[in-house]
């Protein structure tokens, strides 16, 4: 079976969040199951720089006469056997900044074209005029940046490729002025509420939800949540309408997140040799300028600093938190106001609070390895990967019970500890009081060394491999191909 996996980021070529991790691990796991899967992604400077030996495989024939000049390059995704098709188009992608925003944090003003073109090329590779002698049976779209493909296929004559859309985060929708409908090669007749239109705009994500043959999202709980007004971001009605075609498949984590083999950390450890974790904690305290105290609970956070991640609730607890026997290490970047408020606390308590405003892959590994508890009070969380990395690294997560966090973290109680299912701490209402109470519960547990060790080990022995998820995606693909 041939699969075209279209995405806007792939680790290690370009990463802003969990989508990049999934876009590496899932295709790799599917490739290992014998699928001919190829990744299509834009040729940002960081991607081209890391693939100097990529070979040109074809010129892109644009659907419109004034379409940009572009070609496809092919290489293997580093560390895997999975081919990547890189869409090289200097006019759209050769610029500094993140894939989505300029250096000042503003969305690129031509994002409709940048990702609309990615979608057009994805649809072209599925159709009869593709320059490749390879046709996908399935095109797997990820988030809004590739979600226009199903609509483009729908308007092709006799499309032979079936479309799967995975929603990694419903809050990012790709909504643009209606003029983009025709500019991106779609008929204005499909600009209505059962097609491309969402509150007067062209919505990439809504059109994907409408036209994809199957929709998946990244946890069962989030699949249910997005069908409600509280989490549906205005699309709950449509998602309810498509609920028979909507599946929740929880992500796995990549093999590189393994504390026994991780080259980025100070000392290797595993569930049977946990004592060495203390060396990582010492190294992290030193690196972050915190008091070197093995007995104090070291709390870690690695996250986008946004409202979604519940940073406002954490900030409301900071006064109390600095009274508790804990230290806090935060690595992240995002909203300026949150960055400033966090830095304020780090300046007030440099021996207790460390804030690094950066995107630093190696430091994120050192934090997982060195911290005792991992904090993730997300307001909503489609799946979340960091809580699983934390469990694998013997740092029980403390989470708000939502989305994938609810599906992957089992709250520690005397009962769940006794029956060996406890993996962390969770609470229902996202309030400063609930966060503080849960933190106090975690601190009490931490001071009971035997129970804490047991909790760490249960988490470390959980199976987070991609095999289970890959088998479920394969079942979705097979069903679609069989229907075709
Ligand atoms: P999301 O995709 O919503 O940001 P996830 O938990 O699914 O959240 O994935 C986040 C990924 O991005 C993880 O791999 C995490 O380690 C990584 N990450 C987030 N912020 C940073 C940062 N500042 N430095 C390094 N890695 C980061």
Image (cartoon, rainbow, N blue to C red):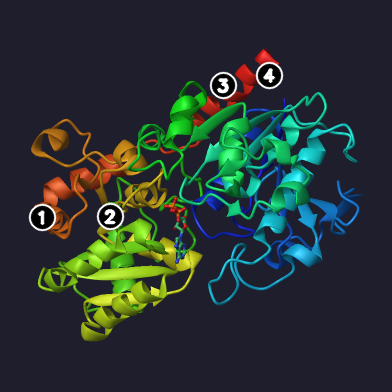
Image point (10%, 52%), residue name: 441
Looking at the image, residue 419 lies above or below residue 93: above
Looking at the image, residue 445 lies above or below residue 346: above
Q: Is residue 374 left or right of residue 140?
A: left
Ligand 1 sits in quadrant: bottom left
Earlier-in-chain disc, 4 versus 3 = 3
Image point (63%, 42%), residue name: 147
Looking at the image, residue 279 lies above or below residue 192: below
**Which residue in the protein does label 3 denote?**
475
Q: Is residue 38 left or right of residue 14?
A: right
Q: How far is mark 4 from mark 3, CA to CA?
A: 10 Å
Q: Quadrant of the C terminus?
A: top right
Q: How far is mark 4 from mark 2, CA to CA?
A: 40 Å
Tell whether label 3 touches label 1 (CB within 8 Å): no
Q: Quadrant of residue 67?
A: bottom right
Tell whether label 3 touches label 4 (CB within 8 Å): no
**Which residue in the protein does label 2 denote?**
377
The percent coordinates of residue 165 (x first, y second) are 59, 36
Q: Is residue 171 left or right of residue 447?
A: right
Q: Is mark 4 within 8 Å of ligand 1?
A: no
The percent coordinates of residue 392 (x first, y second) are 36, 47
Q: Secondary structure at mark 3?
A: helix
The answer to whether residue 75 of the structure is visible from this angle is no
Residue 157 versus residue 221: which sits nearer the camera? 157
Q: Which mark is residue 481?
A: 4
């Amino acid at each position: 079976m041939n699969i075209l996996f279209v995405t806007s980021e792939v680790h290690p070529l370009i990463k802003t969040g969990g989508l990049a991790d999934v876009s590496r691990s899932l295709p790799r796991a599917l490739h290992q199951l014998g699928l001919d899967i190829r990744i299509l992604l834009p040729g940002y400077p960081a991607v081209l720089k890391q693939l100097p030996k990529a070979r040109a495989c074809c010129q892109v024939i644009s659907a419109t006469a004034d379409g940009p000049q572009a070609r496809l390059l092919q290489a293997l995704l580093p560390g895997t056997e999975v081919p990547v098709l890189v869409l090289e188009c200097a006019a759209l992608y050769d610029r500094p900044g993140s894939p989505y925003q300029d250096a000042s944090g503003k969305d690129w003003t031509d994002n409709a074209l940048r990702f609309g073109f990615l979608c057009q090329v994805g649809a072209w590779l599925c159709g009869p005029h593709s320059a490749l002698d390879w046709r996908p049976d399935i095109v797997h779209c990820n988030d809004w940046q590739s979600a226009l493909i199903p609509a483009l296929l729908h308007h092709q004559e006799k499309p032979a490729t079936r479309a799967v859309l995975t929603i990694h985060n419903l809050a990012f929708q790709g909504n643009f002025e209606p003029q983009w409908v025709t500019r991106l090669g779609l008929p204005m007749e499909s600009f209505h509420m059962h097609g491309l239109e969402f509150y007067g705009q062209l919505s990439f994500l809504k059109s994907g939800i409408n036209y994809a043959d199957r929709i998946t999202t990244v946890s069962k709980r989030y699949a249910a949540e997005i069908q409600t007004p509280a989490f549906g971001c205005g699309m709950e009605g449509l998602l309810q309408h498509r609920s028979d075609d909507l599946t929740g498949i929880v992500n796995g984590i990549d093999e590189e997140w393994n504390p026994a083999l991780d080259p980025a950390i100070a000392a290797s450890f595993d569930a049977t040799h946990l004592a060495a974790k203390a060396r990582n904690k010492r190294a992290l305290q030193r690196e972050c300028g915190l008091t070197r105290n093995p007995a104090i609970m070291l709390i870690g956070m690695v996250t986008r600093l946004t409202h979604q991640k519940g940073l406002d609730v954490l900030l409301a607890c900071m006064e109390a938190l600095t009274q508790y026997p804990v230290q806090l290490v935060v690595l992240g970047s995002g909203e300026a106001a949150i960055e400033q408020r966090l830095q304020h606390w780090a300046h007030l308590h440099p021996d207790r609070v460390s804030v690094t405003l950066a995107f630093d892959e190696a430091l994120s590994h050192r934090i997982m390895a060195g911290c005792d508890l991992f904090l993730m009070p997300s307001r909503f969380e489609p799946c979340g990967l960091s809580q699983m990395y934390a469990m694998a690294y013997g740092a029980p997560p403390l989470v708000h019970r939502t989305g994938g966090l609810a599906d992957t973290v089992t709250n520690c109680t005397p009962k769940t500890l006794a029956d060996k299912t406890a993996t962390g701490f969770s609470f229902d209402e996202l309030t400063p009081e609930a966060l503080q109470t849960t933190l106090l519960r975690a601190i009490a547990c931490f001071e009971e060394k035997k129970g804490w060790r047991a909790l760490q080990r249960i988490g470390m022995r959980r199976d987070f491999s991609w095999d289970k998820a890959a088998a479920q995606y394969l079942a979705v693909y097979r069903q679609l191909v069989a229907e075709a």
